[in-house]
Amino acid sequence: EFPPAVRTPRRDSAAAASSRGPAVAMGDLSVDPVTFWERLSKLHKTWNAERQQDNSVWKGADALVIDSGGLNDDEVYSKSASLQNWLLGIEFTNTVIIVASRSVHVLTDGKKAALLEPLRSAENATLPLDLIVKDKTDKNKANHAKLIAGIRASHAGATVACLNKEKPLGDFAALWRAALAAEEGLAQVELAPALALLLASKDSAELNCIKRAAVFSAVLLTKQLVPRIEGVIDEEARVSHEALAQETEDAFGDPKKLGLNLSAENLEPCYSPIIQSGGAYNLKPSAYSNNANLASGGTITLSLGARFKSYCSNVGRTLLINPSKEQEKNYKLLSELQIEAIDALKVGEKLSAVH
């Protein structure tokens, strides 16, 4: 079993999978020091180079704060979790990371601090790494003072970028945020847009994870879900959308049955597959497969997505059963437009120009 405060490898990112350097291990958990320091350096250099530019997404921040609270399965795609996965390959609950101009500070529990300790002496380390262990005796009051001192010592020490739109669970994060808010003369700006832009550019390890997720999604759709739907229609069987979605989701547990040499431990659904038919359709991401039976004709919409080491893919398909001439015409036009859009997505082109 994994320590309760650390997510299992089903949410590990490319950092833990990297083979470019020796891994720092604690039981079944590991952090790749090469990946950690390469990506931390990218974050640090980008922020310092752009923080004072006009209209910068870094908004003049003198330091960066990435904090997390207790385990929250309802918030899978937070920026704090994304950055932790990107840097560490693991999601750390109840942790504060401060990136300053000349140092990095981490407040966490003893087990996670021990996991990070070898990073301090890694050959490619670029900044001092200050590891601070949580102290329940004073509810981290002294530790909060150390973190704030690190912020104050960074550049002008007057503006800090935080993930204020996130609402971390538990007293650990609440007490830290209260201490930060109580610090006079320290302005806060939103960090999320800057992190989104930073993480949008993928390295080769990340692209490999995305490709594997996409391949699994495509194969799952074409080799299992579509043939299964065709069989239900041909046999005039009564199978609900919900049951078909569950069958599809169960396939994540054994990729080899689909002819794919992927570890099930690294795969999970981005969301429960969405299957709709019978004239009632919800095209929002929050849609779900209801318990109505699959219609034997008309239009059927399918959507599913796989995460491989926390990197997501998505695929959708519309099946037209005995379509009308108008539907065939519209489908042909949309298919041609999709090809045009894909062809326009060339390296160096602005998305606004493609649009």
Image (cartoon, helix red, strand yellow):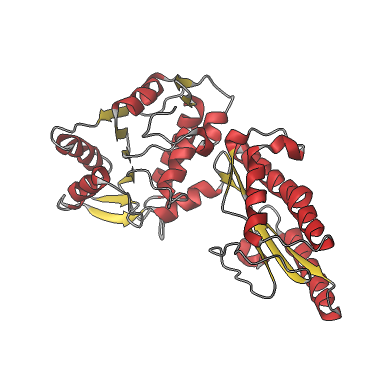
Can residue 239 be seen by looking at this rendering? yes
Measured from the top left, where is residue 104 in percent x and y?
Answer: 33, 34
Front-most of 112 and 128? Answer: 112
Measured from the top left, where is residue 79 in percent x and y?
Answer: 43, 49
Examine the rendered structure and indicate whether residue 135 appears above or below residue 188: above
The N terminus lies in which quarter of the figure? top left
Figure label count: 0
In the image, taking residue 56 as reference, residue 183 lies left or right, namely: left
Examine the rendered structure and indicate whether residue 118 appears above or below residue 53: above
Q: Quadrant of residue 165?
A: bottom left
Q: Quadrant of residue 333?
A: bottom right
Examine the rendered structure and indicate whether residue 68 appears above or below residue 102: below
Front-most of 38 and 17? Answer: 17
The C terminus lies in which quarter of the figure? bottom right
Residue at figure coordinates x 73%, y 69% from the top left: 295
Residue at figure coordinates x 62%, y 59% from the top left: 242
Examine the rendered structure and indicate whether residue 9 appears above or below residue 181: above
In the image, taking residue 6 as reference, residue 152 lies left or right, namely: left
Can residue 99 be seen by looking at this rendering? no
Residue at figure coordinates x 47%, y 50% from the top left: 77
In the image, taking residue 320 as reference, residue 74 lies left or right, namely: left
Measured from the top left, where is residue 246 in percent x and y?
Answer: 62, 51
Measured from the top left, where is residue 170 in percent x and y?
Answer: 27, 46
